[in-house]
Amino acid sequence: MDIAVPIVPMLDMSFQLLAFFILTFKPMPTEGQLAINLPRLDATDTPQNIDPSHLEDKKDEYTITLNSSADGGVANISMKGPTGASPDIKNTPELLYQLEKITPPAGRKREEGISITIEADDNLTYARLIEVMNMCKRAGYETVNLMPLRKEKS
Amino acid sequence: MSHGPAGGGHGQQSAEPNLTPLLDLVLQLIMFFMLVANFVMDEHSVLIKLPFASQAKPLTTKDTRITYLNVDKTGRVLVPLRDPLLTPEEIKFHMLTLARTDPLGEAAAKQEITVIIRADKDARYHHILKTMQAIKAAGYSKLQLRAQIAENK
């Protein structure tokens, strides 16, 4: 005599479960990272991530200042380097152009000779910040520093 | 019982399909979807809508030790299975607890672990700074901001 295991109800249930998991499945979007240096805790804190072997040759420091509008968008971009402020920058493509124009100190690569600091308004949204960081990276600067906006500016 | 042979009880031949391989396959699929679903729930909060960046780099095999901090648009840090962290002190305490309970030991964990901030695209700059300063205060040294990789933008 043949004893059959009732497999059909089991299969029914399995299909139910399968349908449930397929319907609740949400494929993860591809995500990636942008590297940043940790900010200084206050003015007395020394900058981080300085390679001790390169401590003697100082980097050219450029500061990108982002003022935000009330809704968190970028209202005003300005960039200041060792040779003075860059001309008016109206939007992020222009910022990219200005960043690409920077010449690194003689004999050093762009990434090693230049340090970029972003100073932004408290109100700026993360999306706009990432957009500017994206431009920095496109221009060849892998890592940027983030700082709060200095209230008193000369 | 309805699962008898198709041609009545007295025939020699059975026309019933063999369902066992099908069941095996279905269980395999269920297992796959269950595992993937749990992985997503664990550290990637679905409440966070990331901004796009074309230059963001995916994780490499070099980054073995990673922890995520999800910052929502009101600046709260979402932690799985716990209440959201609101103040810098709470974030710092959370990060310190994470380092202390790490099998590597506290000091090595702070050096090795890469902290990835997943912030909502509408989160404000001061929320990010607050979180970053708390991570710094806890003693971590590697930090990255996460974005969704866009084709061209």
Image (tube, rainbow, N blue to C red):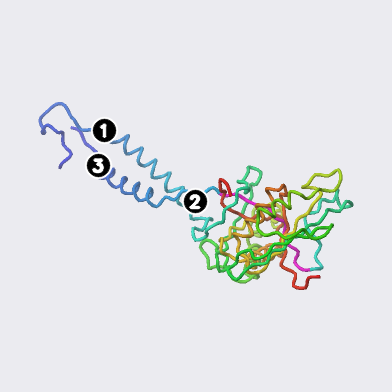
Pointer 2 indicates a residue of which chain?
Answer: B
Contact (CB < 8 A) between labels 3 and 1?
Answer: no
- Name the quarter where the C terminus of chain A is drawn: bottom right
The residue lying toward the viewer, choosing from B31 and B53, is B53
The alpha-carbon separation of the residues under discs 2 and 1 comes to 34 Å
Q: Furthest residue to the top? A: B12
Q: Which residues are magenta?
A: A31-42
B122 relative to B16 in the view: left or right = right
Q: Does B63 lie within the magenta span?
A: no
Please give the residue where the numbered disc 2 appears in the rendered image. Answer: B39
Characterize the local packing of mark 2: few (<14), some (14-19) or many (20 or more) Cα atoms within 10 angstroms: few
- Asked if labels 2 and 3 share a chain, the reply is no
Q: Position of residue A87 (x, y in %)?
A: 76, 59
Q: Residue at x 72, y 47 (%)?
A: A140
Q: Position of residue B65 (x, y in %)?
A: 64, 50
Pointer 1 indicates a residue of which chain?
Answer: B
Please give the residue where the numbered disc 3 appears in the rendered image. Answer: A8
Hey, which quadrant is residue A14 in on the image? top left
Q: Residue at x 82, y 68 (%)?
A: A44
At label 1, which amino acid type do we have? Asn
B91 relative to B29 in the view: left or right = right
A145 relative to B49 in the view: left or right = right
Numbered tag placed on residue B102 in the rendering: none
| SS for callout 1 | loop
Image vertical order of residue B72 relative to residue B10, above or below: below
Characterize the local packing of mark 1: few (<14), some (14-19) or many (20 or more) Cα atoms within 10 angstroms: few
The residue lying toward the viewer, choosing from A141 and A90, is A90
Contact (CB < 8 A) between labels 2 and 1?
Answer: no
| SS for callout 3 | helix
At label 2, which amino acid type do we have? Phe
B137 relative to B72 in the view: left or right = right
Pointer 3 indicates a residue of which chain?
Answer: A
